[in-house]
């Protein structure tokens, strides 16, 4: 069964840190580009970080220097380390897997709430 399962969300105070994990199953994980998206209340889902199969990373400007994406191809896990969290980072974080020519795969999301 093809699944992406996120974990690690929660509630923290501003300045705190969280580490999200996305566990993949049913896919050949190493051939997928992986990304994390955030959907803030009342906003569209947007990508915040991505990592290619060649481990090239990309970040949206407002998380650069604070968020770090990584992948473990053996464990089939994509992680997002989030530091210096701000209330504006509050939202549901989704993991996505992309392989050219195939539909993107999505997890169910994990809630991150940052209080001031």
Image (cartoon, helix red, strand yellow):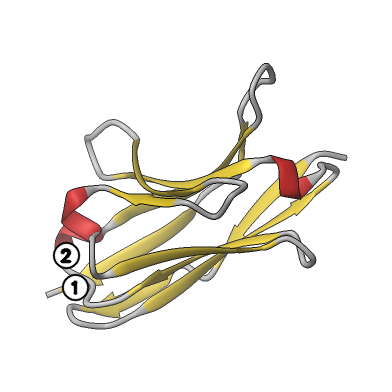
Which circle's residue, 1 or 2, is located before the other in the chain?
2
Quarter of the figure with the C terminus: bottom left
Q: Residue furthest top?
A: 101
Quarter of the figure with the N terminus: top right
Q: Quadrant of residue 22?
A: bottom right
Q: Please name whichever residue, 75 or 108, is drawn nearer the observer in this view of the structure.
A: 75
Drawn side of residue 68 relative to residue 20, left or right? left
Rendering coords of residue 25 (x, y %) = 81, 50
Rendering coords of residue 8 (x, y %) = 52, 71
Q: Quadrant of residue 88?
A: bottom left
Residue pictured at 74% horizontal, 49% vertical: 30
Residue tagged by mark 1?
Answer: 115
Residue pictured at 74% horizontal, 59% vertical: 76
The local secondary structure at tag 1 comes to strand
Residue tagged by mark 2?
Answer: 87
Q: Please name whichever residue, 72 or 93, is drawn nearer the observer in this view of the structure.
A: 72
Instruction: Tell me the CA gap for discs 1 and 2.
Output: 6 Å
Rendering coords of residue 28 (x, y %) = 82, 43
């Amino acid at each position: 069964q093809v699944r992406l399962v996120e974990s690690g969300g929660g509630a923290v105070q501003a300045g705190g840190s969280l580490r999200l994990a996305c566990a993949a199953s049913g896919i050949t994980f190493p051939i997928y580009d992986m990304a994390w998206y955030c959907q803030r209340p009342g906003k569209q889902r947007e990508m915040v970080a991505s990592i290619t199969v060649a481990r090239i990373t990309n970040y949206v400007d407002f998380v650069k220097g604070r968020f770090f994406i990584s992948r473990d191809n053996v464990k089939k896990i994509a992680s997002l380390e989030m530091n210096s969290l701000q209330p504006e980072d509050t939202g549901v974080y989704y993991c996505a897997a992309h392989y050219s020519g195939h539909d993107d795969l999505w997890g169910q999301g994990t809630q991150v709430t940052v209080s001031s």
